[in-house]
Image (spheres, rainbow, N blue to C red):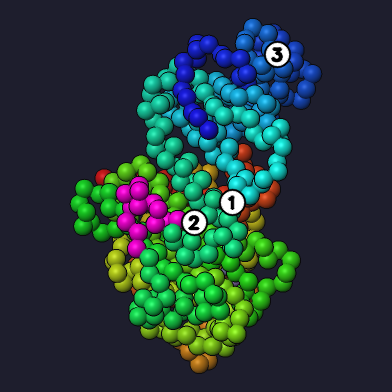
Amino acid sequence: MDIEFVAASAAVAPRTALARIVFEGEALDGALAQAATGSRFTGGKGQTLDILAPAGTEAARLVLVGAGKRETFDALGAEHAAASAYAAVKTSGLDVLRIETPNGDAALAARAALGVRLASYRFDKYRTKEPAEKKPSIVKTQVATAEADAALAAFPPLAALADAVAFSRDLVSEPANILYPAEFARRVKELEALGLEVEILGEAEMAELGMGSLLGVGQGSVRESQLVVIRWNGADDKTAQPVAFIGKGVCFDTGGISIKPADGMEDMKWDMGGAAAVSGLMHVLAGRKAKVNAVGILGLVENMPDGNAQRPGDVVTSMSGQTIEVINTDAEGRLVLADAVWYCQDRFKPKFMVDLATLTGAIIISLGNDYAGLFSNNDELAGNLLAASGLEGEPLWRMPLPPQYDKQIDSMIADMKNTGGRPGGSITAALFIQRFVNGLPWAHLDIASTAWKKPSSVPTIPDGATGFGVRLLNRMVQEKYEG
Ligand code: BES
Ligand code: MN
Ligand code: ZN
């Protein structure tokens, strides 16, 4: 999608769909008012009204896009209105979408452009027979604003964000026969072109480090497990303590010997959504040359049943030295994170660690499909994440880490076991990871509820992979840890 910022007075080319943002309860002029009376369009959020061959313009159609009340219109409102405008005309057959933004605010115009970039994401590389008339036709979006130069100047970091979200969504959308740990690592290695440093550790190196917990998960797979270390040193002081992000990257989760039921198992291709979010975050930090030192760690494995797979009841020794009784081989994400998190703090001594993981079905039961669970041992970090979450429209809900629940994961024969039973399933999973953070400020985002949306409830997120986490972490870094 090409993006341009143009003056409000710029001539409208033929084959253009014009979108006008309309606030709830505000009068429309003449013919438009008459058109609106023939519909239920009131300017409410998400409403659109399509008018063909409108009088007084070259445009082939005009779409009125409701944006709710003017007083509450903000940057996210601009994104959503622009995304709704795109959705209304994307398969109209027209080439250009021109969005008229309501006032001279350059920041809002830039965010409208971001909204279209995010909404026009599509994963269609495996569709070889889709008829042309079913494909989106809009190839260019013009955002019309009185502040076109300022909007253009504000856009590059948002374009970098859109690129990074698309990168993350692509990883999540890929099927597991294509995207296995080594292929995931290879795609991340290509990000060195952006200025990132990428190291890839294979099974021999991880065995050397004593990562028995992560390696046990991948033991039944013919695909080699990988640990990827991504570094961005953008701070003026290249030796300044980094911030760190760790992602669960289970490229496919069959459950292992504790195998999952067939129904819906295909969803487990997106059990690497945490690693994809961390990859996307590093992508945008490099893309916009963020003034921060950051580390991203990806624990990449495939969880398969096999003659060599680990068994329920096996005991593994993690890199921390702590032993784990594997009660259920389907509680594998925490086993991967145990070693990835320990490695991260041991090697990088970061300011804080945030891990992201599609960790538990229980978080979907707790929070539904719009909120991810936030668990943290540090109120300042949790507050920073919540603030960024609100600004970027990636909702988080803080969950507790009650010390008295921790004994649910004590084991009879090892230091701990990998499941704590059904009560508080997301909480005991988080408490398990907490045993590997070595007292550092840490937060865990359980994104099993938000990594994939079908149907999506947000116009900037097409059905499928969301890229959840990239936006909020980028915003938190930008607001709190740069410069
Ligand atoms: N990857 C799953 C969690 C998940 C479920 C993600 C649904 C997305 C959608 C995770 O590895 C898992 O299997 N968790 C188990 C834990 C249980 C065995 C303690 C679960 O949630 O059932
Ligand atoms: Mn599992
Ligand atoms: Zn899993």
Q: Are marks 1 and 2 in contact (CB under 8 Å)?
A: yes
In the depicted view, which residue is nearer to us: 9 or 205?
205
Question: Split into 4 quadrants, where in the image is the C terminus?
Answer: top left
Under circle 1, the secondary element is strand
Left or right, residue 288 beside residue 336: left
Mark 2 and mark 3: Cα distance apart in space = 44 Å
Q: Which mark is residue 276?
A: 2
> Mark 2 is on which residue type?
Ala
Circles 1 and 3 in contact, beta carbons < 8 Å: no
* Mark 3: secondary structure: loop
Along the polypeptide, which appears first: circle 1 or circle 3? 3
| Label 1 crowd bin: few (<14), some (14–19), many (20+), radius 10 Å | many
Q: Would residue 403 appear left or right of 195 to someone viewing this image? A: right
Start-end of magenta stretch:
187-199
Q: Choose the circle earlier in sequence order: 1 or 2.
A: 2
Magenta segment includes 103: no
Q: Earlier in the sequence, mark 2 or mark 3?
A: 3
Residue type at mark 3? Answer: Ala
Tell which of 177 and 394 is nearer to you. Answer: 177
Looking at the image, residue 128 sits to the left or right of residue 394; the answer is right
Name the kind of residue labelled 1 in the image.
Answer: Ala
Q: How far is mark 1 from mark 3, CA to CA?
A: 36 Å
Residue that mark 3 sits on: 53
Can see residue 482?
A: no
Residue at screen point 56% across, 79% down: 220
The label on residue 465 is 1
User: Does residue 207 lie above or below 242 as drawn?
Assistant: below
In the rendered structure, the answer to whether residue 421 lies left or right of residue 394 reads right
